[in-house]
Amino acid sequence: MDSERTAVFRAVEPETGEAAGNGSGEPKGQAADSERTAVFRVPKVDALKPDGGQKQKPKPPAARPGSAPAPGPRPASTSPSAPAEEAADSERTAVFRAPKPEALRPDAPTKPDAPTKPDAPKASTFVPLRADGGAPKAPVRPVPPAPGSAATTTERLDHSDRSERTTQQPLPPKPPLDMLADLTNNPPPPPSPLRTAVRRVKIYAPLVVLLAVILAVVQLVRPLPEPKLVMTAKSSYTFEGAMPQLPWPTEGQAYMAAAGLGTLGQSGEQKPVPIASVTKSMTAYIILRDHPIKKGEQGAMIDVDKTAETEGKKNNSTDNESTLDTVKEGDKISEYDAIAALMIPSANNIARLLARWDSGSQEAFVKKMNDTAKELGMTNTTYTDPSGLDATTVSTAEDQVKLGLKLVEIETLLDITKKPNWIDPSGKSWRNWNGLTGPSGALGIKTGTTTKAGGNLLFAAQKKIGNTNQLIVGAVLGQHKPSIIDTVLAASKQLMTATQKALDGAIVVKKGQVVGYVDDGLGGRTPVVATADVQAIGWASLTVDVKLADGGGKMPQTAKAGTEVGLLTVGEGASQVKVPVALQSDLASPGIGSKLTRIG
């Protein structure tokens, strides 16, 4: 390296001459020469130019201390103008100081005079400690230039001096491999694509491995996704045949539907008409919705007020109003009995009592009735009183069927409305105005008759198909042929019977058939099968939906074969067919490979 090379200039010691006879025994200028062992003088550049006149002759070297001046003519440098030239030249000289030779010491013995001779030109030897190529070379003595080549030598020295006068600058830092090669004294191998690629692999491979380990740990400790059921069976089933034709009434309006299946048809214009005591169906729905009665219980106890007792006495030929005339102020009546009095003998005074008990006033309760109608989609219905005595309470057969489909989902209500008669708390028996109950198989729901409204009936029935009780709901309004109650009952019975005959069942899925699988979220799939035959209920040309759901429970991560994990359903509502589905094989937890390779 250049930074480690050292140059030593050693002065060649000439033979010691005798002192000049100047009285002091030393030549003139000994004090100055004793400090300049080797002097390299650069000739003036001007003197070397072609137009500078004659070439300057080289000056003889200065005499060594203790040597006599050479005989003969003095060089040109001894002329009076020499000091001026030396002063100028001294500004362009390189001075190398060396210890005084022993001959100059005060205690050194002086040698006898010897014949003086011209001093040889002082020279220095460049001795590198180590050459670029290896071992150092032996020093070479400079050869004095010939007299005739003085100008050429001077010109060469001038150019050599210019090229060698440089300023050292710090080297930039080297790459690590080059510095290592310098320390081991071995040059680095030349760069190549393969060597660069290997070096990059050595640098980045540990980082890649570390990242892979971190990613693997994260993947293993992440929570597993929730398993879910996926259905592979057909999502619907269509019954063969043409749509059945029902015996619709010749007047008024009618509407027929099956719970969870759809509509069988309608007749007449669906326009709002008075519905009389059918209004009490909405009153019963709100009371049982907001104050549900558990099966086998009687519900809340309601205080009978003075108004209910007074209105109960209107059950006469003058007022011709249906009431429960056995209640007295201060009595208590259970919620169950109040609903029975509302739906079987159609007691108007109990309808108003329930309104006041629930909402504080009849007006507030009527508002709740209209709000509920909007929630159920009964867009053509308006309630003005809780009993239906007012002719301004109007609705349509279609709207009343929408309400009836919600009523058949309340088991307590159907338990009341299907009774042919009811005995009140006082022991009095009351006949159910809906004559379709009992042997005809009807489940209620409510009759309504007035001179203006005619005969009206909202009814429900059922048909046993397989293990399912299929519910049907119908409404017949505006029957004015006398007797209006008998006319509406007859028209309703025909619709009910025809609809029951039209209903049929068909096997959609057989027991043990694969209907879907459990997806563990990481690619694992475990088949699920039906635990029993799945029977769809409907009528010709009807299409029913088939759905697979988890049944509301949390899907396990692991389970044995045969474990029930969901429900296969056909239809909707109260008549929906439900069959459990179970695992065909063991549900296992995802493996390590699935955990490591999962995305998202």
Image: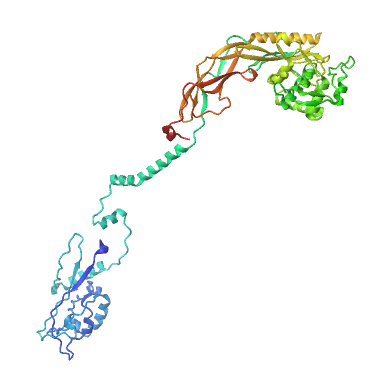
Q: Quadrant of the N terminus?
A: bottom left
Q: Residue at x 64, y 14 (%)?
A: 469
Check the image and report above or below for 246 versus 329.
above
Task: Give the camera-side residue of 312 and 201.
Answer: 312
Q: Where is residue 403 in the image (x, y as percent from the top left)?
A: 71, 20
Task: Give the camera-side residue of 362 and 152.
Answer: 362
Q: On the rendered structure, is 85 left or right of 201?
A: left
Check the image and report above or below for 391 versus 357.
above
Q: On the rendered structure, is 555 left or right of 382?
A: left
Residue furthest out toward the bottom: 23
Q: Position of residue 58 (x, y in %)?
A: 18, 76
Q: Can residue 63 be seen in this view?
A: no
Q: Where is residue 166 in the image (x, y as percent from the top left)?
A: 28, 67
Check the image and report above or below for 186 versus 270.
below
Residue furthest out toward the left: 115
Check the image and report above or below for 500 versus 373.
above
Q: Can residue 229 be seen in this view?
A: yes
The image quadrant that residue 419 belongs to is top right
